[in-house]
Amino acid sequence: MQKQVYLQTYGCQMNERDSEEILGMLTAQGYAIVQREEEADVILLNTCSVREHAEARAFGKMGIMQQLKRQRPDLVLGILGCMAKAQREEVFRRLPQVDLVAGPAEIYDLPDLLAQVAEKRQRQGLVAAIPDHGPLPPSRSRILALDRQVRPLDRKPAGDYRRGQVTAFVTIMEGCDKKCAYCIVPMTRGQELSRPMQEIVEEVQQLARAGYKQVTLLGQNVNSYGKRFPDGSGYQGPGRRRRLLELEAEPGAASQGVAEGLPLIDFPVLLRHIDAKTSMARVRFTTSHPFDAHEQLFCAMAECPTVCEFLHLPVQSGSNGVLRAMRRGYTVEAYLSKVARLRELIPEVALSTDVIVGFPGETEEDFEATRALMAEVEYDSAFIFKYSPRPGTEAASWVDDVPRPVKEARNQALLALQEEISRRRTTRWVGREVEVLIEGRNRRGQLAGHTRGNATVVCEGPNTCIGELAIVRVVRAKGTTLIGELVP
Ligand code: SAM
Ligand code: SF4
């Protein structure tokens, strides 16, 4: 009988794409995807560890799921992703009936790992019955896979699965080499590794041929794409990258660089290749660390017609003291000058950011500096997070000294400020014609999509528009949504 899998994803877009890859591999093995846990033979949670809240949700969900095993001891439960890696002890302690625990670097092994669970059960005879009441015993068929440091990117998994038909995610690199003091990602996802450029270009072209109109290139810091490839090549570090850029600028020296096997492949080069060599209509990317966002990136954005005029550039704080403590590697002044240069090259560019409030040692003055920066930059949108200590990170050993109510108040103040700015920024489109990628219908049955700057647009129109680029005249704004009419 066909096995059924249910998979729930927590966290970032990289996790969403990982979940698609997992479902692709499992469907290639004959599994059917189901939308309800009760119908599944295998329940998988692809988890996130960036904040405590995300972990609490996954623990809560799996806590309920493992009770299902009292009626169905043959059910297979798996915790995958960052929380599996960061919290393995807690997973064992709190979720004794979980059968499979696998980190982000092990996702390509999943079909094998599930086969190992089945084999272990077979060897032990029938799965042991679990009493109706009382504490759950530990699973006897538990398989752990957490030791790999980096995902083997040269091993292309079988099968392909995408949730959408208009827009798609394309992972261009794994891991993160930054060491932001608050962040668990370098621990859970390991060292940076970039996928070969040709492979990415081919994947984007295949998606274009299949009818997709937009790709979002994904990485924890796409701006350091190309630093290290699976075959050991790559520009290695920012210093070497600078040198290669200089070489390319010197007349005649570029060929010398090429002869030495040194041509620079970095993120702007990748954007230019995708723009020139594929027929994809729109290209987005996330996330950009400000330290590595350079003039070359801004020029590539300005010059490549397919690259959307949108940049997510997480600032985290408007205080130099806090930025230093966070180990972000840039100052407020450097950040602002990058924003100014980008706006000079692309005046209509839409900007978004991430901000953390209540980082250890954040004073009222530091917080006011963040508020002032947000008012000055006028982002189109922003994610505001309350600092959450993550065990194992550098900042976790510091006193979490901003009281919870103060974090909450700072969070609310920035949300209110941003909402007002976002609404104001949205109204600048009223009365203008914009290009919209129509992605589907919203709950009210209207066509819905996004502008190149990522503003949400709704309008009336036929189904034939879905999956197409349409010109829409914006009539009014409701909150941060633009309401418009199709231009025939
Ligand atoms: N790589 C991306 C970058 O550097 O911008 C983002 C990665 S992280 C998954 C997304 C956001 O979560 C970060 O930009 C940061 O604002 C937030 N974040 C990370 N660790 C956090 C923590 N310990 N507490 C609160 N927010 C956190
Ligand atoms: Fe985390 Fe910093 Fe890496 Fe982003 S750049 S994933 S915040 S360590």
Image: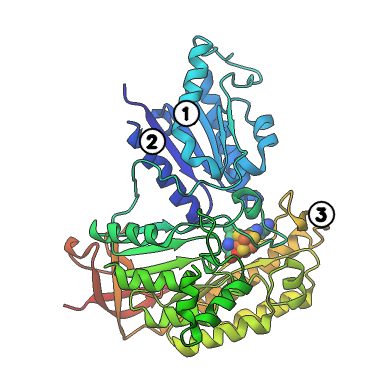
User: Label 2 amino acid?
Assistant: Leu
Q: Residue at x 42, y 29 (%)?
A: 38
- Image quarter of residue 480: bottom left
Q: CA distance from mark 2 to mark 1?
A: 10 Å
Label 2: how many Cα within 10 Å (few below 14, some 14–19, many 20+): many
Question: Looking at the image, do the residues carrying marks 3 and 1 touch, with CB atoms under 8 Å apart?
Answer: no
- Of the 4 image quadrants, the one containing the N terminus is top left
In the displayed structure, would residue 341 be above or below residue 414?
A: below
Pointer 2 or 1: first along the chain: 2
Query: Relative to the observer, which residue lies in front, 265 or 381?
Result: 265
Position of residue 321 measured from the top left corner of the image (x, y, whole percent):
77, 75
In the displayed structure, would residue 439 be above or below residue 147?
A: below
Does 456 sit left or right of 166 as displayed? Answer: right
- Judging by the rendered image, the residue that carries numbered circle 3 is 397
User: Label 3 amino acid?
Assistant: Ser
Position of residue 57 measured from the top left corner of the image (x, y, whole percent):
58, 44
Q: Residue at x 36, y 74 (%)?
A: 452
For the residues carrying marks 3 and 1, which lies nearer the camera in this image?
1
Which numbered marker is on residue 26?
2
- Image quarter of residue 227: bottom right
Pointer 3 or 1: first along the chain: 1
Q: Can residue 17 be seen here?
A: yes
Where disc 3 sits, the SS reads helix
For the residues carrying marks 3 and 2, which lies nearer the camera in this image?
2
- As drawn, which residue projects farthest toward the top? 125
Does 143 sit left or right of 482 as displayed? Answer: right
| Ligand 2 rendered quadrant | bottom right
User: Label 1 amino acid?
Assistant: Leu
- Judging by the rendered image, the residue that carries numbered circle 1 is 114
- Of the 4 image quadrants, the one containing the C terminus is bottom left
In the displayed structure, would residue 267 be above or below residue 9?
A: below
